[in-house]
Image (tube, rainbow, N blue to C red):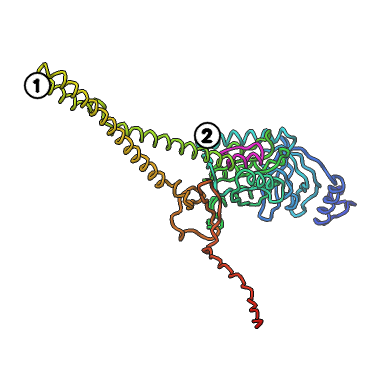
């Protein structure tokens, strides 16, 4: 016998698979139209399309979630596995797989504490690898010819840097424009550091001698791109010294620890990068004056030493007359000795006076010789040449330029005259002497003869 309960017809509505799946979808979306969920990020995958697939979980459950490309691009912080977050979005179902999911349109760290904990964890990891050690840091060039700046091209930061460089020591500046906030900023900043290190340099686009990575102040979320691991590793691998100038003096990011020098502000980075040109000029002028005084003292000292070495001693001049006097006195008789002594004494006095006069003439001649040698020395010095109307040409490094052929049009040089230095630029053409115009002679009017 058949069981009547089993074979009894059912009054329940019969759904198709699609009807039931989409009915559940409507029910979920109407019941949970918009939700705010706090949890920890598990799996984080950013597809080539730009969409992000993540798991939001706690210790008992997991919700598969998706964030579309447009929302991902606006994230202030790049999501990572283990980050504690608060997400907002719409709960829906995916009928093709019989699962529900959360479509996220807003994601933020669960407070500053979560970001600080992640920052401290990453800092310890990089420090353990030795990226922050002082012996890895490079020395900054004292006077760079070209400075590379990595920052936003539209903000106040680049204007502050350029103005400060112009005030202190104008140099060539190459700007690599990047985003300095948002999820895409870290990739652009690391690419800019690597690009400056490896692009093919030319005369018009030289390789920078130092890099400045700069951004204005902001919250920890705003500055988070400078804490990203790819930015820190790109800065560590740079062969060009780096000055970090991110935020204000109290703002510290991980790039500050790996950079070769940290500036408290972008303006401070410009002050670190170059010295003050006016102070350098004053220092060089002071060194030149001290050198000139030292040379003059040396010349005068050599003149006196030369004169003292060439002049004879007074005893040596009088020794021969004295010896002749003594020999003659020994041969004289006593009665004639007095008269002979008187004559010899007079002769000795005359000889002494003549010796003094001879020595005076010799001293005058030696003095004239020394004066001539001093004038000749002054004439042979480069300062004497400058006094005669010549100029000394040097390049920006201070090297003397002896030939004009290697100079190129537009190249900056320095001209040293007898009274100071002047800057000049090579235009590539020799100066042409202008011909003087002959004065126009007035036409002579010849007066006729009255007769």
Indicate the position of residue 335 as horizontal and vertical percent values: 11, 17
Q: Which residue is labeled 1 in the image?
A: 331
Indicate the position of residue 369 as horizontal and vertical percent values: 33, 41
In the drawing, does residue 53 fall left or right of residue 130?
right
**Camera-side residue of 430 and 404:** 430
Disc 1 element: helix
Q: Vertically, is 131 above or below 92? A: above
Q: Is residue 270 on the magenta stretch?
A: yes
The residue mark sitting in front, 2 or 1, is: 1
Indicate the position of residue 437 as horizontal and vertical percent values: 59, 69
The region drawn magenta spans 258-275
- Residue at 56% x, 45% y is 210
**Camera-side residue of 111 and 424:** 424
Q: Which residue is labeled 2 in the image?
A: 134
Q: Quadrant of residue 303?
A: top left
Toward the front, the furthest residue is: 451
Give the CA distance from mark 2 to mark 1. 96 Å
Q: Quadrant of residue 323?
A: top left
**Camera-side residue of 380 and 10:** 380
Earlier in the chain: of badge 2 and badge 1, it is 2
């Amino acid at each position: 016998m058949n069981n009547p309960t089993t074979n009894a017809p059912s009054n329940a509505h019969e759904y198709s698979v699609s009807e039931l799946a989409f009915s559940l979808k409507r029910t979920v979306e109407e019941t949970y139209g918009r939700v705010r969920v706090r949890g920890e990020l598990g799996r984080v995958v950013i597809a080539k399309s730009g969409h992000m697939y993540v798991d939001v979980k706690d210790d008992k459950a997991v919700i598969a979630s998706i964030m579309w490309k447009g929302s991902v691009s606006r994230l202030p912080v790049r999501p990572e596995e283990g980050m504690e977050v608060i997400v907002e979005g719409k709960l829906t179902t995916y009928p093709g797989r019989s699962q529900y999911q959360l479509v996220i349109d807003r994601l933020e760290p669960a407070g500053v504490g979560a970001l600080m904990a992640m920052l401290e964890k990453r800092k310890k990891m990089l420090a353990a690898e030795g990226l922050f050690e002082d012996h890895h840091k490079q020395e900054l060039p004292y006077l760079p010819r070209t400075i590379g700046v990595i920052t936003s091209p539209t903000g106040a930061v680049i204007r502050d840097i350029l103005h400060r460089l112009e005030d202190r020591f104008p140099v060539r500046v190459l700007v690599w424009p990047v985003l300095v906030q948002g999820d895409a900023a870290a990739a652009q900043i690391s690419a800019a550091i690597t690009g400056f290190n490896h692009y093919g340099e030319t005369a018009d686009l030289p390789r920078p001698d130092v890099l400045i990575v700069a951004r204005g102040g902001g919250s920890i979320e705003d500055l988070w791109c400078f804490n990203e691991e790819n930015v820190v590793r790109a800065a560590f691998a740079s062969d060009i010294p780096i000055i970090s100038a991110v935020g204000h003096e109290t703002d510290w990011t991980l790039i500050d620890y790996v950079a070769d020098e940290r500036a408290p502000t972008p303006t401070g980075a410009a002050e670190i990068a170059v010295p003050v040109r006016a102070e350098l000029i004053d220092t060089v002028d002071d060194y030149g004056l001290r050198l000139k005084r030292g040379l003059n003292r040396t010349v005068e000292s050599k003149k006196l030493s030369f004169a003292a070495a060439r002049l004879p001693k007074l005893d040596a001049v009088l020794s021969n007359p004295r010896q002749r006097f003594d020999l003659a006195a020994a041969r004289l008789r006593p009665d004639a000795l007095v008269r002979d002594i008187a004559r010899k004494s007079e002769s000795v006095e005359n000889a002494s006076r003549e010796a003094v006069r001879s020595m005076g003439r010799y001293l005058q001649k030696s003095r004239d010789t020394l004066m001539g040698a001093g004038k000749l020395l002054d004439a042979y010095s480069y300062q004497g040449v400058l006094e005669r109307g010549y100029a000394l040409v040097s390049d920006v490094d201070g090297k003397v330029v002896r030939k004009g052929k290697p100079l190129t049009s537009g190249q900056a040089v320095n001209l040293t005259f007898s009274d100071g230095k002047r800057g000049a630029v090579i235009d590539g053409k020799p100066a042409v002497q202008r011909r003087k115009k002959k004065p126009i002679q007035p036409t002579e009017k010849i007066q006729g003869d009255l007769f």
